């Protein structure tokens, strides 16, 4: 059960949104867009495991 003070889900969601923002610059190239989303998700998972 997640507690109110649990910030691990914030790290995953926040870095996914950052990946989406970076991906919008690469929007004509679909693979770079998807790659930036996956990088953001992976970065969030790494940060949440450290927190």
Image (cartoon, helix red, strand yellow):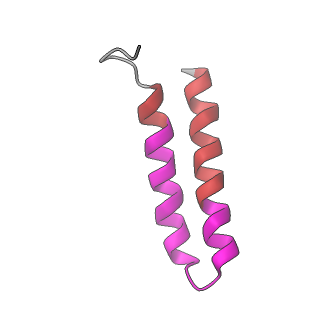
For this orientation, the residue located farthest to the left is: 4
51 versus 43 height, above or below? above
48 versus 34 height, above or below? above
Question: Residue 9 location, x and y as percent?
Answer: 45, 31
**Quadrant of the image occupied by residue 45:** top right
Question: Residue 19 location, x and y as percent?
Answer: 54, 57
Instruction: Tell me: 42 left or right of 44.
Output: right
For this orientation, the residue located farthest to the front is: 1
- For the point 41% across and 25% down, the residue is 7
Question: Residue 21 location, x and y as percent?
Answer: 46, 64
- For the point 64% across and 33% down, the residue is 46
Instruction: Tell me: 33 left or right of 21.
Output: right
7 versus 23 height, above or below? above
Q: Is residue 45 magenta?
A: no
- For the point 48% across and 55% down, the residue is 18
- For the point 41% across and 13% down, the residue is 1
Q: Is residue 16 magenta?
A: yes
2 versus 15 height, above or below? above
Q: Which residues are magenta?
A: 12-36
Please name the predominant secondary structure of the magenta segment in the image: helix
Question: Residue 50 location, x and y as percent?
Answer: 60, 22
For this orientation, the residue located farthest to the bottom is: 28
Report the number of numbered marks: 0
């Amino acid at each position: 059960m997640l507690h109110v003070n649990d910030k691990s889900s914030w790290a995953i969601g926040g870095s996914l949104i950052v990946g989406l923002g970076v991906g919008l610059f690469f929007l004509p190239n679909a693979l770079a867009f998807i790659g930036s989303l996956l990088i953001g998700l992976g970065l969030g998972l790494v940060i949440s495991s450290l927190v």
